[in-house]
Each structure stands twice: as C-alpha cells, then as structure tokens.
Amino acid sequence: MQQEEIRETELAFQIADRIITIQECGEGYDYSIMDQQYREIDGGVYDNPDISILEALQDIVDDLKQNPDMNGTKGNITTEDKLTPLDFDEVAMEAEEANRIGSAVYESRAVMEFKAKTEDYFRPINGLSATEIEEIVAEYINAKVMENDFDASIRGVVLSGSRCRGLEKQYSDLDVVVEYNGDEREDDMFNLLHEDKFSIGGIRVDINPISKYKTGTLEEYLPGVEKYFGEKRQKVSVRDKLKEKKSEIRANGERADKGSKKKSENVR
C-alpha cells in the first residue's frame, strides 16, 4: 500500500533579503514577510483555503516580484530569485525573540525621512533625544501589553505631534504614534496606554495606536502628518508676514504723525 503523502501546514522560506512564513488558519493561510533580522515588515491572511499552501505561497511571492515596492516590503527581490527552504520552528523562535526585545519598525523611506526631520527640529526634553524618547515609549507599551496579556506586538514607535517639528507651545503634549500587530482593537489599545497618565520629563505622553487593517501602517500614516505640518508652517508664515506688515504700517503712521507735528511747530 502506497504511503500517504504528508500534508504541509506550515512553511518558511528565504528569498533574497526577505524571510517568509506561511501556515494554515481558519480563513486560509496566515503569512508574514520579515527582513533578515526577523522583524515583520508585512503580512496578513491569504483568504483562499481551496488552494494548497504552496500555491498560496507562490501567489504571495509572485506579487512581491511583480508589484512596485511601495512600503519597503519587496526589498532586493527580483524576478529571478528563488525560494530557499528554512526550518519553520527556528524562524518562529527568532521572530518571537525579535518582537520580545521590541524591534524597531522596518525603516521604509517614508519613516526614515520623517524621523530625520524630527531629529532636526526636536528640542530635547531633560536631555533626551527623539530616538531615546521613542525607545522609552516602546518599553512602556511592551510592559503594559505583557502585564495585561494583550495580543499585540509593536511594529514601530514614532514621535508625531507638534514637538517633532518644533511647533509646540509651552504645555503641548508629547504626541507619539505606535503601529502594532495583533488582534486587539485600536480603542482598547488606546484605553490601555492612557490609564496611567504616562509622562516623560513632566510632559504628558499622548499615544495613538494604529494597526494595518484599520488606520493603516506608519508608512501610510506619516505622509498625512507631514502634510499637516507643512500646512501649519505655511499658516504660521502667513501670520508672521501679516504681523510684520501691520507693524510696518503702524511705524509708518507714527513717522508720519511725528513729521506732521514738526511741520506744525515750524509754522508756529
């Protein structure tokens, strides 16, 4: 009697500088795309359980090869690159460790450019740089998530409010956006992260949690924040010009009044 072929339910592969895991789930196949440090860049559910796990994997790889790299997911993958099998359990352990230590968001161009501008404009708080503050916030979030057994792992933490562009007022909060992976609702994450009134250097930290399947990724979210700041700077610039113009008109009026007084004195 011919031995029945073993049916694969979970697989891991490397292709160029990307690692891909895929496994069966209720809706089809759950997959993750990671960089070489096992940090998740992208992932989701391939919702067609009627095809095999290898066919689903091949579709995901074909999409990576054919589509333009919009958020850093594709990396160095080319149409000629082949899949190299990896041990699924070993990859899963490495990925778990990467998440445990709070790995940073995969630095797509949009995220890197946003953070670079923040370093230029940010005014240190108690000697802490923007990057150091993001690390402190990440540690706080990880602790809250573990303490409350939330199904969430940090993908990235980025300063996002007025302080990241030097536009803050005296009592402005420290606004931070955090992207996370997991099944927790954004409003539940928000409530969890605000129950302690967390602050740094006496400044309240306002944490805005976002997820890929609701608000979107950091790569999608940050360009809108940058656009807002550009418009805000423009408004400030126009307001300053109006103030300068009013001051100039007032000064001209005062000079005119003084000139009129001198003429009156000369006539007398």
Image (cartoon, rainbow, N blue to C red):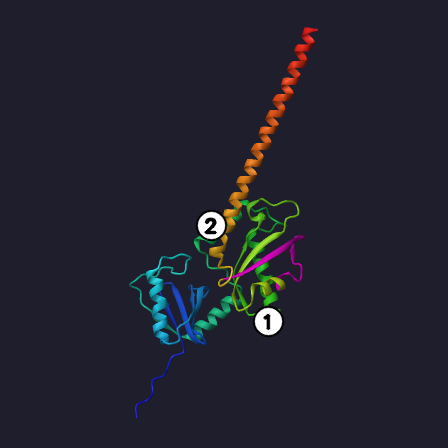
Q: Which amino acid is tagged 2?
A: Glu
* Residues shaded magenta: 192-211
Left or right of residue 208, residue 85 in this image? left
Task: Name the residue rendered at 57%, 32% in the picture.
Answer: 242
**Numbered mark located on residue 35 in the image:** none
Assign a secondary structure to mark 1.
loop
Q: Are marks 1 and 2 in contact (CB under 8 Å)?
A: no
> Label 1: which residue?
149
Of marks 1 and 2, which one's residue comes earlier in the chain?
2
Callout 1 environment at 10 Å: few (<14), some (14 to 19), or many (20+)?
A: few
The quadrant holding residue 149 is bottom right
Taking the magenta stretch, the answer to whether it contains residue 265 is: no
Q: Is residue 228 left or right of residue 61?
A: right
Which residue is nearer to you in this view: 185 or 35?
A: 185
Q: Is residue 170 left or right of residue 237?
A: right
Q: How far apart are the two marked residues, 1 and 2, measured between alpha carbons?
A: 34 Å
When the figure is inspected, residue 262 is found, relative to residue 162, above or below; the finding is: above
The residue furthest top is 268
Q: Position of residue 117 (x, y in %)?
A: 50, 47
Q: Residue at x 30, y 62 (%)?
A: 79
Image coordinates of residue 219 in percent, x first then y, are 47, 56
Q: Residue at x 48, y 59 (%)?
A: 217
Picture quadrant where residue 70 is located = bottom left
**Residue furthest out toward the right:** 268
Q: Can you say which quadrant of the picture contains the N terminus?
A: bottom left
Residue in the picture at 53% in, 69% down: 183
Q: Disc 2 marks which residue?
A: 113
Does residue 196 show up magenta in the picture? yes
Q: Position of residue 151 (x, y in %)?
A: 55, 70
Q: Is residue 252 left or right of residue 22?
A: right
Q: Amino acid at mark 1?
A: Asp
